[in-house]
Amino acid sequence: MVKCGHSDYTRPAFYSKLTPMARALPSMSTLIQTLTLTLVLFTVSTPVTSHLSSSLSPSSSSSSEWRSGRATYYAASDPRDVVGGACGYGDLEKSGYGKATVGLSSALFERGQICGACFELRCVEDLRWCIPGTSIIVTATNFCAPNFGFPADAGGHCNPPNHHFVLPIEAFEKIALWKAGNMPVQYRRIHCRKEGGIRFTMNGSGIFLSVLISNVAGAGDVAAVKIKGSQTGWLPMGRNWGQNWLINADLRDQPLSFEVTTSDAITLTSYSVAPKDWKFGQTFEGKQFQS
């Protein structure tokens, strides 16, 4: 869990009148023609775009649309970088995420389903602290828990309905000076770009198998996983927590294949990722989604 709020980390540095009614009533055919022309002109001049925009729901907007939020930071060398946070990625440096990571408030975290998704953030509004023309790309790896001891607009940064991001100081300072504290930002979901293939880390014991799925490109957040041994068909796995997926089945002594589906409903199959003699604690690399 990320402790949100301002860090104690310190550093030195928008006919003009209606036509009069005729004295004599027009013929019926003339009246029909006039009404028809009026209806056509009204239809053509009605702004269709305003009708469409008013009928769109927020959920139907493009994933690349910039939205408003806020961001804070935590100090360097924080133990949470080693623990790996609520998504279960472990040591973020060793797993390849480095400092390009973020903890999300509950309004964004989706109970861990968002783990692995990528966001682009930029500083806005505050010209005193923003670094102009900059943005950062970060991967969701942690959860910023709400603090209901404070109102959402007065200390409870990660309380619903706030869209809040908690960044490592190294990432924060790429878009703003550290003195900005609780900073207004704009953010948007983007496709993740990763080096190498999807990583499958085998954990568990006996017939209990838990697989950490990391380094996922494309949408980034995994929505469903299936596993197949050489002696089985495709077996669905369940989400344990974050991006740890589990199954109770004896899959020892057989090569393993994985079918991974991301939140955009794209499925990628990696055959025989783990060899017949795989062991708990090992990590294997499969195919990769397009960025």
Image: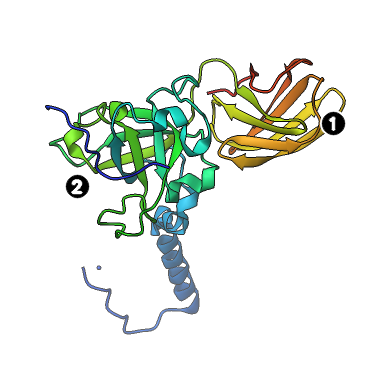
Residue receiving disc 2: 14
For marks 2 and 1, the one nearer the N-term is: 2
Residue receiving disc 1: 233
Residue at the front extreme? Answer: 205
Badge 2 crowding class, 10 Å Cα cut-off, few under 14, some 14 to 19, many 20 or more, is few
Closer to the camera in the image, 2 or 116:
2
Badge 1 crowding class, 10 Å Cα cut-off, few under 14, some 14 to 19, many 20 or more, is few
Q: Name the residue rendered at 79%, 19% in the picture.
A: 255
Q: Name the residue rendered at 81%, 31% in the picture.
A: 250
Q: Secondary structure at mark 1?
A: loop
Q: Report how many numbered discs are placed on residues in the image.
A: 2
Location of the N terminus by quadrant is top left
The part of the image, by quadrant, that contains residue 267 is top right
Q: Name the residue rendered at 20%, 42% in the picture.
A: 125
Closer to the camera in the image, 229 or 263:
229
Q: Secondary structure at mark 2?
A: loop
The part of the image, by quadrant, that contains residue 10 is top left
Residue 274 located left or right of residue 199: right
The image shows residue 130, relative to residue 279, as above or below, that is below
State the colouring used for the structure image: rainbow
At label 2, the amino acid type is Phe
Residue 285 at what x, y percent from top left? 63, 17
Q: Determine the CA span between mark 2 and mark 1.
A: 59 Å
Q: Nearer the viewer, mark 2 or mark 1?
A: 1
At label 1, the amino acid type is Gly
Tag shown at residue 53: none
Check whether the beta carbons of the residues at disc 2 and disc 1 lie within 8 A of each other: no
Closer to the camera in the image, 61 or 286:
286
Residue 150 at what x, y percent from top left? 29, 58
Residue 42 located left or right of residue 29: left
Residue 164 at what x, y percent from top left? 35, 45
Residue 120 at what x, y percent from top left? 38, 32
